[in-house]
Image: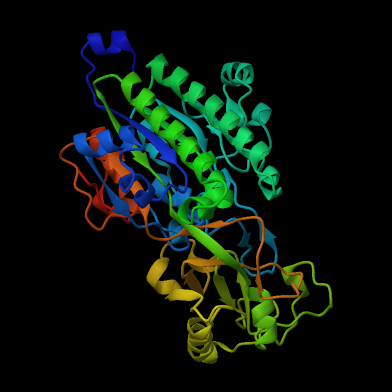
Amino acid sequence: MGLFDRLRGDGAPRVAFIGVDGVPYSLLSENEELFPNFAALADDGTASEISSIVPPESSACWPSLTTGMNPGETGVYGFQDREVGTYDTYVPMGREVQADRVWDRVQEDGRKATVMNVPVTFPPQRNVQRMVSGFLSPGLDKAAYPDDVRDYLETLDYRIDVNPKLGHQDDKAEFIEDAHATVDARFEAFKHYIEEDDWDLFFGVFMTTDRVNHFLFKDYERDGEYKDEFIEFYQKIDDYIGHLREALPDDVTMIVASDHGFTSLDYEVHFNEWLQEEGWLSFATDEPEELGDITDDTKAYSFIPGRFYINLEGREPRGSVPEEEYDEVRDQLKADLEALEGPDGNPVVERVVEKEAAFRGDHDDIAPDLVAIPNKGFDLKSGFKADSEIFTTGPRNGMHSFDNTSLYIDHADATIDDADLFDITPTILDLMDIEYSRGDFDGASLV
């Protein structure tokens, strides 16, 4: 909807959503003097901590945020999912998302949506105004639609993602430089298309914040070597949010949100190794390479992050747990997880969620039976190569959290009470005066 459309009387309200992947609310709210543009958003509208989803992993979070539905409806539970009735696994991409995205509903209403860099959107949809796929895209040449979008982005040296391998180096200078270059090009692209002013919904995501958090968050929380560089990066994000807000026309409401929170990381916990040592899991080979290498006396196995599956008869190909023993076995596994302590004596798991409490819908047949939500400091890993240790440390010093997710709405009438990711899509539709049924979502509008 451009200038001439509005002059013709088409005054339907619009929304610009800017995602800041993995940004914890406390980081912004406790440092308002450092981040004045986020503070201004909160003062002029409303802002608060909200909850993420179970599990708080980006590959599951963004489909839920952009549909208003839990993974039982989206069909995406994490970075890796399993095929029904087999031990085969796959990496979910955009086509695996089984629920309508918010921009699908906008387009169906006869309006236009520009979508940029949202995780789990590859390949780009051809039924939107323009789309640049995000995380998991193989490269810009295949991630941008239409072609003129790709051609423009190439002039910016636009990249889909930062190079995370640079974060594995002891010296983080090259990683930090790459993060700045990535976010600079992202901002220029967002600003360019916002100023085109031909859309009804602009939906763009800064994912580089998540990457910086993974490798520098403990430096921020515990006064580490790169604390100043961390703050400087976030001051740039704050500045970019301010510039994007200034570029928006008066008929646009701005929403800024993260998909999960973040906290410092002390130990990675390799749960398939723990399951082996505790007698829950066994492999047919000393060097297993995939889930299919488990034996038929296995009782449980794990996927990241903290997803646990009972090896159930009739569901898994080599299921060993009879259906009548399912509840007893699951209860025992839950109790064992709750009792697990780390090397420092602290509980690894904050709580364990049963599948029926978190997932419901047409695609809950691949849902995990249990999801462990970790205590701060523990990152829940899996893998099928039988790591030599249960607790290890690596190059990452930050990890996702379920709580402390950020939401800012530049609307004075918005109310954020006990909100979560599921509330964002109905809120966007309400702000745009697009009709929907209350039963369409697991969340509710905040305006």
Q: In this view, does 110 lie to the left or right of 221?
A: left
Residue 161 versus residue 220: which sits nearer the camera? 220
Quadrant of the image for the C terminus?
top left
Q: Indicate whether 214 appears above or below 434.
A: below
For residue 245, what is the image quadrant? Answer: top left
Q: Judge whether residue 111 can be spotted in this image.
A: no
Image coordinates for residue 68, horizontal then vertical, percent: 36, 50
Q: Which residue is drawn at 39% across and 33% down?
A: 238
For residue 112, what is the image quadrant? Answer: top left
Image coordinates for residue 115, horizontal then vertical, percent: 47, 31
Q: Which residue is drawn at 43% across and 47% down?
A: 23
Q: Indicate whether 184 appears above or below 65.
A: above
Q: Indicate whether 104 appears above or below 344.
A: above
Image coordinates for residue 131, horizontal then vertical, percent: 52, 29
In the displayed orientation, state which residue is furthest to the left: 413
Residue 296 versus residue 261: which sits nearer the camera? 261
Q: In this view, does 66 lie to the left or right of 367?
A: left
Q: Indicate whether 32 appears above or below 363.
A: above
Residue 146 versus residue 388: which sits nearer the camera? 388
Q: In this view, does 283 lie to the left or right of 224?
A: right
Q: Judge whether residue 394 can be spotted in this image.
A: yes
Q: Which residue is drawn at 29% across and 19% down?
A: 249
Image coordinates for residue 385, horizontal then vertical, percent: 76, 69
The colour scheme used to paint the residues is rainbow
Q: Residue at x 53, y 83 (%)?
A: 340
Residue 224 versus residue 59: which sits nearer the camera? 224
Quadrant of the image for the N terminus?
top left
- Count of marks overlaid on the render: 0
